[in-house]
Image (tube, rainbow, N blue to C red):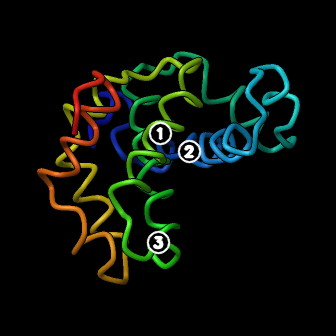
Amino acid sequence: MLSCDTCPGGEACAGDRLTPVLLRVFELYAGGMTDKFEILFALDEAEEELLETCTANVERACWTKAGLGAIADLLVQQEDGIVGNWPAALEETLSVARDAFARFPWRLTDLVEQAPDLHEAVLERTDGNGFSTAISKRTFTKACRAVVYGDPA
């Protein structure tokens, strides 16, 4: 996935460091907490500190990398729990992520533009065959396009 020019993939990479915060935001949003202030107040001190330190002078590419990284992690977490209906689970995960991350300055269109790289990132992180056998790169890209642009998958 694309990085900014300042810290492309290094230990100080804001995109990598913000990924766990966006995972937590997704978890809270999926659990029914949709108010942005409630979500911010629900973050623990470490997550708040990370948000404060990583948001100063952070480029949109960093937020996008964090959002896409969070989506990849979420799909990997679901690898063992989904039996048979990966297309529906994929669309649901992408839709909730789109809505949960809407108030962060990530580029939603990169979900489509970087879909092949995101698909590869999920494949690299999975141990089983659930995702890899059920979701091809083409199917994944079509699902991303449907969630972003409303095109039928």
Badge 1 marks a residue whose secondary structure is: helix
Name the residue carrying label 2. 17
Mark 3 residue type: Ile
Earlier sequence position, callout 3 versus callout 1: 1
Could you give the CA–CA distance between mark 2 and mark 3, rounded to whole angstroms? Answer: 28 Å
Looking at the picture, tell me which residue is in the foreground, 45 or 38.
38
> Within 10 angstroms of label 2, few (less than 14), some, or many (20 or more) residues?
some
Relative vertical location of residue 99 with respect to residue 119 in this rendering, above or below: above
Image quadrant in which the N terminus is located: top left
- Residue on which disc 3 sits: 82
10 Å neighbourhood of mark 1: few (<14), some, or many (≥20)? many
Label 2 to label 1: alpha-carbon separation: 8 Å
Query: For the point 39% across and 52% down, which residue is it?
Result: 90
Check contact, mark 3 vs mark 1: CB within 8 A.
no
- Residue picked out by circle 1: 66
Q: Nearer the viewer, residue 147 or 21?
A: 147
Residue type, numbered disc 2? Arg
User: Would you say the residues marked 2 and 1 are in contact, meaning their CB atoms lie under 8 Å apart?
Assistant: yes
Q: Residue at x 21, y 49 (%)?
A: 117
The Cα–Cα distance between marks 3 and 1, rounded to whole angstroms, is 24 Å
Residue type indicated by callout 1: Ala
Which is closer to the viewer, label 2 or label 3?
3
Q: Does label 2 or label 1 sit earlier along the sequence?
A: 2
- SS for callout 3: loop
| The quadrant where residue 7 appears | top left
